[in-house]
Amino acid sequence: MDQTARPDSIGVLTSGGDAPGMNAAVRAVVRTALAEGVDVYAIYEGYRGMVDGGDAIRRMSSHDVGGILHRGGTEIGTARSDRFRTREGRRQAAANLLAHGIDALVVIGGDGSLTGANLFRTEWPELLDELVEAGEITPQAAAAHPHLRLTGLVGSIDNDMFGTDMTIGADTALHRITEAIDALHSTASSHQRSFVVEVMGRNCGYLALMAALATGANWAFVPENPPQTDDWEAVLQRMLRAGRDLGRRSNMVVVAEGARDRNGTPITADRVRRVLEEGLGEDTRVTILGHVQRGGSASAFDRNLATQCGYHAVHELLRLAPDEEPKLIGIRGNRIATSPLMDAVERTRAVAGHVERQEFDEAMLLRGGSFSESLETLRTLVRAQPSAPIEGEASLRLAVLHAGGPAPGMNTAARAAVRVGLDRGHRMFGVRRGFSGLRDGDLDELDWMSVSGWVSRGGAELGTGRLIIGSDELAGIAAAIEEHRLDGLLMIGGLSGYEAAHALHAGREVHPALGIPIVCLPATINNDVPSSELSVGADTALNSIVADVDKIKQSAVASRRCFVVEVMGKGSGYLALTSGLATGAEHIYTPEEGITLEQLRDDVRSLTRAFREGQSLGLVIRAEQADAVYTTPFLWALFEKEGGELFDVRQAILGHVQTGGNPSPFDRIQATRLAVRGIDYLVDAAAGDDPVSAMGGMIGGRIEFTPLEQLPAMLAERAADPTAVPWFSLRPIADVMADPSR
Ligand code: ADP
């Protein structure tokens, strides 16, 4: 056997609990395999279909996986199979796979499914021997496929798996939970009521914790971190009563289904309800979200995560030596990462074991730093009132402002910044209308409750603006900083805000009052801030585009039609490329690449070919500044003329709906994490002798700070090679997914 030989045919299955995004993964596996010239089969109904064989194992064409990207659940079905748990069942499964020459698998499922797959792979040579002995397959057939290659993707809403920061489906589940809790918040505050919400998570508190952070809930109970004391009931009652006294209109407590106390006794939603009723003497309702959390259309993040994982899973299978250990494909620090599959499964089981045995410190350690950090942040933000203020000089006066276009999540970040600043003992000020407001001294001191309810609110309560800083502005702002005795500025906004902050920083030579530290945090739907791979607001805008494009596609039922959709992004193609990938666009135009006449000629040809071959729907996404001459109306006219009788063309310029709407859970979580770290940085800088101004951003999944002086150099570097941003690695994947020539 040639160790470098590629697998004959690849099989793909979804198994265990269904999760939104599984369809995107299957589609990506099929299209990548076909692009690589390898046959690919879908195994319907998970391992049950593998054991049954026959019609459950079907060869797939690119067309077979068209139109499934936006659907929830899994189109190829999933099931639990007891027969696959038996050796006899697995022998039958091996025979069924061999009948199609399948000797490589992509398994999309939870830890159970991946354990089963690994066992199957380990037994494979023996199973084939047994099949030869029984005369069911020929020795030649066995010799041609001596090993089973395997890669696994984690499809699970729980986000409970090692080897990946996010499992496929968790982000969508968080969307469902957040929508539900937002809705409950509005009814709860109308009636001054308390709600206890139970979310999924037997061993993993990820959904409960992140949902609580994203919705401003008052508390979260998670399996791996039970209340630290036995009198938690009294503590909770005291905390909620204090909140009521301060004017809080609703109480919301999130409980993971596997939550328990220090002694291992379950903390059920009903138990929490009784605690609240007894403590507050008021009506408390329980809502168990149940299977709603699994359902619905996959979020943009899940579609793109699943697509990337599916693409890489096939490439990994083609790279693996036949007898090489199986690999798990996941995401680490915002990049696709490959790890040994069984190691990931074993560590996942270890956490469950620790929780079971009430070894909570060990469980938390294995969960990792960002989980503990989030829990700590939640503890700070949910307090009804901050820790006591610091007296005298050490108490700083810190101002928060926005600049640039509005971005969903600005309010979330401002709220977290104000509360953390207050909790650290400082005085917090909110500046209205960005740097113009600062120049005009338009600012107010903010207290704990003044930011109540901001966590989920779209827009920007403080307002935002784009002020170009000239010498008059510098003098005005310096005077305002002096007058209000500000010790530091937190700017949460877009690129123009960064440029303004840099101008202030540079102006400190002339105006010493400008020598206070400034921290900039990225909040812009354009995702074009060079010091951060992701900015707050971009995920919400992306989901908004994806929801609109889904609807636009659905509107074309009766005709052959091609849509040209224009999305925002200023000079950045981030929204165009990521929304194109998440909606299955055939062509995506970005400013980083521009548009050439030659490319348009090719694209017209491929579009007309596809429609001639029977395609009924086309989708083209163009970033607003992709090209100055080849505008959206130009593309529309070109395609309309060239499409002739074959198809008609409609254009949709999505416009400002993209900057509106309530922030997505991901944006709320990032906004909160960034703001907490941003304030801590600012406090340290302001207390130091040599204050350093900085830009805080997400780099490789971590929050990093870069000196503000580096902004011009970073912008110049980006201008020299605009495609050298990490998200551009999605381009080849989008091309493989869209190629209509297969
Ligand atoms: P999940 O993959 O979501 O954790 P399950 O644990 O129910 O879901 O596993 C799904 C299927 O995977 C099972 O019905 C069974 O067919 C197979 N499976 C799970 N664990 C094993 C195992 N230890 N050996 C063989 N097959 C297994």
Image (cartoon, rainbow, N blue to C red):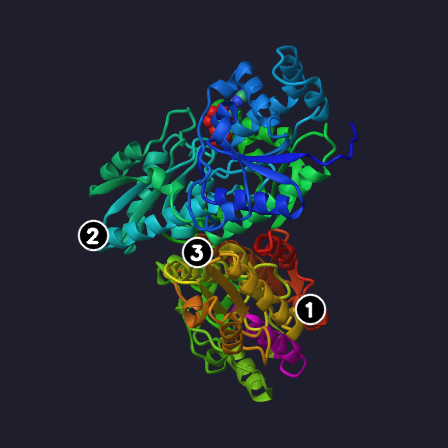
The residue wearing badge 3 is 664
For marks 3 and 2, give the CA distance.
26 Å
Residue 525 sits above or below residue 59 on the image: below
Helix or strand or loop: what does disc 2 sit on? helix
Q: Amino acid at mark 2?
A: His
Q: Is residue 383 visible?
A: no
Q: Is residue 586 visible?
A: yes
Q: Looking at the image, which residue sits at the far top? A: 133
Indicate which disc residue 718 carries: 1
Whole-percent x, y for residue 213 in the image? 43, 49
Whole-percent x, y for residue 338 in the image? 66, 40
Depth check: give the residue in front, 531 or 216: 531
Q: Specify start and end residues of the magenta stretch as a single range.
A: 488-512
Q: Quadrant of residue 699?
A: bottom right
The residue wearing badge 2 is 191
Q: Is residue 556 left or right of residue 165?
A: left
Whole-percent x, y for residue 145 in the image? 69, 26
